[in-house]
Image: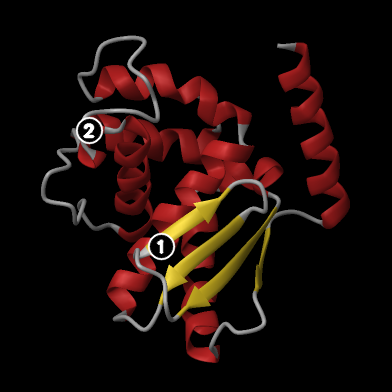
Amino acid sequence: MLRVTVSAVALALVVSACGGPKITFGANTPDDLRGLVDDVWDQFRDAFPALDDCVGEVRLEGDWDLDEQGEYRALTATITVGIPGPPSRLSHTIVHELAHHVEAVCPTQWDLRGSFLAAQGLPPGTAWFEAETWEEIPSEQFAEAVVEVVLGWPAVHYRIDLRPEAVELVRQWGLTGRT
């Protein structure tokens, strides 16, 4: 616990020194993707103002050869999105991966997990990052709830069933930082 607290304090100091959350781009990120990301970033920040103290800097890169729609690498705080793609898919992927970034860097998200599991009808103590299928992983359900809050779209993955109370919980957490 002390280690997490010290890490959270150190992260808060880094974020304040940097002037708040910011998104940067890899050198090979096309200009049209940068424009889309800027718009999505603004929507994300508007929906989750309570996270400004923990988000820090995240890097986004476009990858023409990525086998997935997107991925997040916590060690480097890097989101990679597969390009090209339609703006709707790219927007969805960017927000989904931003949700994974928040999981990695915002301590209040860790506090949210138990309430989110309950709101989704999952038993207490359910593993956050593991399940039989991708759609059953609570972390992925959380990321899709973030997409719904930020973009206003329901989960595009037909096998993820988000309960309205789980989406509302994520919405309120993003506004207040509390569960």
Q: Amino acid at mark 2?
A: Glu
Is residue 33 toward the left or the right of residue 73 in the image? Answer: left
Farthest left residue in view: 158
Q: Residue at x 60, y 46 (%)?
A: 74
Q: Earlier in the sequence, mark 2 or mark 1?
A: 1
Q: Residue at x 72, y 21 (%)?
A: 4
Q: Quadrant of residue 29?
A: bottom right
Q: Amino acid at mark 1?
A: Gly
Check contact, mark 2 vs mark 1: CB within 8 A: no
The N terminus is located in which quarter?
top right
The correct choice, above or below, for 49 with respect to 153 in the image is above
Give the percent coordinates (x, y) of residue 112.
46, 24
Q: For mark 1, does the 10 Å Cα neighbourhood hold few (<14), some (14 to 19), or many (20 or more) residues?
A: many
Mark number for residue 171?
A: none
The correct choice, above or below, for 33 with respect to 124 in the image is below
Q: For mark 2, does the 10 Å Cα neighbourhood hold few (<14), some (14 to 19), or many (20 or more) residues?
A: some
Give the percent coordinates (x, y) of residue 49.
57, 47
Is residue 59 toward the left or the right of residue 33 in the image? Answer: right
Q: Quadrant of residue 151?
A: bottom left
The CA span between labels 2 and 1 is 18 Å
Q: Which residue is mark 1?
A: 70
Mark number for residue 136?
A: 2
Label 1: element kind: strand
Q: Residue at x 30, y 47 (%)?
A: 144
The correct choice, above or below, for 16 with respect to 139 in the image is below
Give the percent coordinates (x, y) of residue 40.
46, 68
Give the percent coordinates (x, y) of residue 154.
20, 52
